[in-house]
Amino acid sequence: MSLASVASQQNSAQNATAAANAAASGTSSTGSTVGTSSGSNALSSLSGNFSSFLSLLMTQLQNQDPTSPLDTNQFTSQLVQFAGVEQQINANTSLTQLIQLTQGSELMQASAMMGKQVAVQSDHMPLQNGSGALAFTAPAAEPAAIAIYNDAGAKIRDALVSATKGQNAWTWDGTDNNGNSVPDGSYRVAVIGANTDGTTSALPFNVLGIATGVQKSGNAVQLQLGALTTDFTTIQSVAGSPAGGQ
């Protein structure tokens, strides 16, 4: 199987992974919004139920049979249950506020990255001002194939490099296989290594880009590298200026 063929298969797998991640991210964001709203509604509902309970309790106490008074253990237990539920709802509200404060701290940290080169884990490479870069790790000195795809899934650029064992860097000049410049944006990328036993395997890599913005999405803080938006948790390193490649 050729490196180009394997790179194409790898891209298909990454497409599925990206779609799954996007779906999971959307679910998480929606779940957070619904959870916050539900907590507020639960506290309001509990307050109404507690008021009704107290009204019924007072009515029972006023109209109880003197010869068979109410069992105080029962309504005392119910009062304890109401208090427990209220404490749990308040704890959830405090947790939500803590998450918001944490996000605010992450936003402040991310803002300090603006204009700096950032390495992130992503299957997309940001092309900024006609340049893109990535760093990959090879288990041994071996050939490595790098393939870049557009949003339609069509391969627009491939390159074969001689990787050394360990860390390697590669820079894209923003042109396709025909030498034509492509517009800045976010492009899918795959890195495949040719093993000494004749097999091929995907190589781990990080993409590099200049931080241009930061935003909050649901429970996550996201960093923008030009057209690429990635979660704050995918950041691997921050440098003062872009690094060169091979």
Image (cartoon, rainbow, N blue to C red):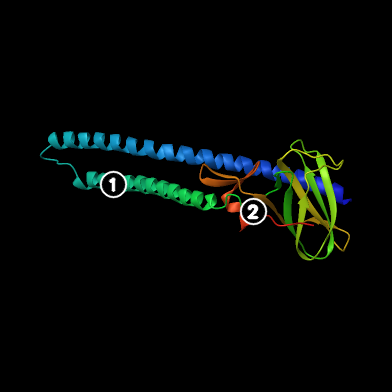
Crowding near pointer 1: few (<14 within 10 Å), some, many (20+)?
A: few
Label 2 Cα crowd, 10 Å radius (few <14 / some 14-19 / many 20+): many
Q: Quadrant of residue 202?
A: bottom right
Q: Position of residue 236 (x, y in %)?
A: 62, 57
Residue 50 or residue 69, whichever sits in front: 50
Q: Amino acid at mark 2?
A: Gln
Under mark 1, the amino acid is Ala
Mark nearest the camera among 1 and 2 is: 2
The residue positioned 79% from the left and 66% from the top of the image is 165
Q: Position of residue 42 (x, y in %)?
A: 37, 38
Q: Residue at x 76, y 39 (%)?
A: 150
Percent position (x, y) of residue 160?
85, 53
Nearest the viewer among 109 and 100 is 109
For this view, does 199 lie left or right of residue 110? right
Label 2: which secondary element? strand
Q: Which quadrant of the structure image shows residue 56?
A: top left
Who comes first in sequence, dot 1 or dot 2?
Answer: 1
Tell me the quadrant of the picture where the C terminus can be found.
bottom right
Residue drawn at the location 34% of the way across and 46% of the way down:
90
Label ID, residue 83: 1
Q: Position of residue 125 (x, y in %)?
A: 71, 47
* Residue contact between numbered discs 1 and 2, judged by CB atoms under 8 Å: no
Label 1's element?
helix
- Distance from disc 1 to disc 2, alpha carbons, whole Å, reads 52 Å
Instruction: List the single residue furthest toward the left.
Output: 66
Residue that carries the numbered disc 2 in the rendered image: 117
Q: Is residue 75 left or right of residue 184?
A: left
Callout count: 2
